[in-house]
Amino acid sequence: MGTSTHSKNRKRAPGTTSVHWFLRGMLGGVLLLTAINAGSYFFRTQSVADLIGENQNVSESLGFPTRVWLETSSSNSGEAGFDLIAAGVNLLFGIMLGSVFGAIGIRYRHGLDRKLAEFEKKNANTQSKGYQFSIIGLLLLTTLVAALTATVINYLKTPQLLLAIYFAGPALLLGLAMIPKGMHWRSRVVILAITEVGLIGLALWYGQSLGVPLERVMLGIFVGWTSQSGVFAFLITVTLLIHMVIKDSASDPNGKNGHASKIT
């Protein structure tokens, strides 16, 4: 009975073959290009005022390396709308970028396997132990709640709060997920998902109270959250790879540290 329960609770180990790492790299490349496409809104658009309902009649567009969407106040523009061909070009570019990342994943597969094994081992028993709030965690949570309350009170019925959701949302979600101590990473993902849905609902309700159309609020969340999440995930991944390469270079070809070992 105990063995059966243990088997049900045990999570399947992540794949460590070359195909798995190539597909992870491919997915990472496509997601990174998606984030870049979302972030291109801020470079291709004259003003972000329409995201908070200012309605300055400016041309808005996004897309990298080609423009996939354009909205303009001019009724005579035949280029406005979504360009499927440009979207296909960008997707192809993302696949090419993902192939490069996939090749890197295959190249450093053994080091990544070790990192993955260390990570899984570290988190193996955390879920069964439950979680708790440390003193620092409680302090951070109290500070976060106080800052959010002050923001809501000071900027209620003003566009600044909507901007804060657009551009501080990912940091808020990550902060809430990381505060509990001793929680398994899968549980943190659940917290992120639930809080994300709640924050999107808050943004939609608040945008409606300001008279901002639903599609404008969703566009603001997309270009704000997607670009930030993608860029930060990329930076974290690059940092991890650099750390792994430096650690491996400090070891000899046999996997032992460069320091002289003692003979016992």
Image (tube, grey):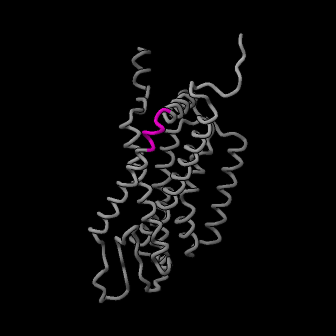
Residue pushed farthest top? 264
Q: Does residue 173 show up magenta in the picture?
A: no
Specify the principal SS of the magenta part: helix
The front one of 105 and 67 is: 105
Picture residue at 31% right of the left edge, 79% below the top:
80
Q: Does residue 109 show up magenta in the picture?
A: yes
The front one of 198 and 164 is: 164
Q: x, y (%) of residue 152?
A: 61, 66
Viewport quadrant of the N terminus: top left
Viewport quadrant of the C terminus: top right
Picture residue at 52% right of the left edge, 66% below the top:
166
Picture residue at 36% right of the left edge, 72% below the top:
67
Q: x, y (%) of residue 136?
A: 72, 44
Number of callouts in the render?
0
Q: Is residue 23 left or right of residue 182?
A: left
Q: x, y (%) of residue 204?
A: 45, 66
Give the residues in magenta: 104-110
Q: Is residue 89 above or below residue 43?
A: above
The front one of 219 and 193 is: 219
Q: Is residue 89 left or right of residue 251?
A: left
Picture residue at 68% right of the left edge, 58% below the top:
146
Residue 156 lies in quadrant: bottom right
Q: Is residue 6 above or below residue 20?
A: above
Q: x, y (%) of residue 111?
A: 52, 34
Q: Is residue 10 above or below residue 70?
A: above
Residue 91 lies in quadrant: bottom left
Residue pushed farthest front? 253
